[in-house]
Amino acid sequence: MYVRRLELHDFRSYAEAAVDFDPGSSVLIGPNGHGKTNLVEAIGYVATLGSHRVATEAPLVRYGASRAIIRCAIVHDGRELLVELEITPGKANRARIGRAPATRARDVLGALRLVLFAPEDLALVRGDPAERRKYLDDLLVQRQPRFAGVRADYERVLKQRNALLRTSYLARKVASRSRRPAEPVDAPDLSTLDVWDLHLAAYGADLVAARLELCAALGTHLAKAYDAVSAGRGEARLAYEAKSWATPDEAGRLAELDRSEIEQRLRAALAEARPSEVERGMTLVGPHRDDLMLTLGELPAKGYASHGESWSFALALRLASYELLRSEGIEPVLVLDDVFAELDTGRRERLAELVAGASQVLVTCAVPQDVPDALRGARYTVGDGVVSRVA
């Protein structure tokens, strides 16, 4: 699989841009702030319907424009597919697949498999649990696009449930301020909370079961990738954590639970946490509070790994994703966004050796000397809104 052509209209800094790519390695060279990352961000958006840089879509639209358009021609097994996305902040995005309108934008998921490594990925090791949950869920969708729907359903139910709890919390707070000293506070109606509990446990069980299976599949790939990147300096492992709904005794055997058992535990945990949730006005149980524990040797990587070890771990997580997707039959496009400047010479060379044989590698850099010889294929210069092929 590879991206043959990318066209942009009012995306980020580009009023118009069109770039043709070949299989193998391509290097985008230019000063920082001139639009290199914007190009690979657009390709990443086609694969994930999200940005690795921002959480909202408004910054993706060029200042002064009302919408942005991305067109991407993808070649797989000798056949070309054109995907078009229209991004309009505040409205539902529109998509076309092979020039035919798609029912939903997320119908394009799966058309392009892509693994992107960027400086922001250091947050996978050093950041909050939300970063690691997103890593797992994005990879889930890459493997099986149907999980985009599961993920959306869970987030919808969680939002509705939180709204109900928050409304109840605020109503009690207002009532307690306005009542007379001896007057009881009327309890807000929470009768629909039981229904939302059932939905949250059902969708949550689907999501957790898939995450657990994914973690099991990633483990071997992660260990091998870290060993290769770090030249054998430590053993990297991962484990799923579910402190909000699993007991400490169950922590070591979460992978043994099937989907129905997970749903039962979520229901029980929600029932037990109900008083605390009502008191605090938020949902305290569910996969939105889970984490991915990363360990290096016997210690947690977060807080104990050095800067170089953290970079190696983040890189190993992305390489593990790449190898997992590759092992399942479709080799993904690999994007290395401005990462060589962050790596020492040894890690640069080892990374280049590991990915040089990929069907397509897209590299961005400010200094061409940062890119190892093994990845010096086609070259493009990027500057002042112009992308030109020079070799």
Image (cartoon, rainbow, N blue to C red):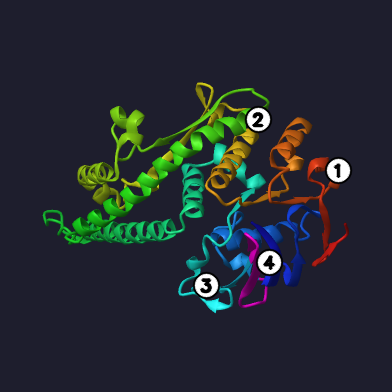
Helix, strand or loop at label 2? It is helix
Which sits in the foreground, 141 or 264? 141
Left or right, 181 with reference to 86? left
**What amino acid does circle 2 point to?**
Ala
Crowding at label 2, few (<14), some or many (≥20) Cα neighbours within 10 Å? Answer: some
Q: What whole-number distance in Å separates the C-alpha atoms at marks 3 and 2?
A: 40 Å
Residue 348: x %, y % from top left? 75, 36
Q: Earlier in the sequence, mark 1 or mark 4?
A: 4
Q: Which residue is mark 2?
A: 228
Q: Which residue is mark 4?
A: 12
Between marks 4 and 3 in the image, the one whose residue lies nearer the viewer: 3
State the extent of the magenta-drawn residues as a range. 62-79
Residue 101: x %, y % from top left? 52, 78
Q: Residue at x 73, y 37 (%)?
A: 353
Asked whether disc 4 touches disc 2, contact meaning CB atoms under 8 Å apart, the reply is: no
Q: Which residue is mark 3?
A: 93
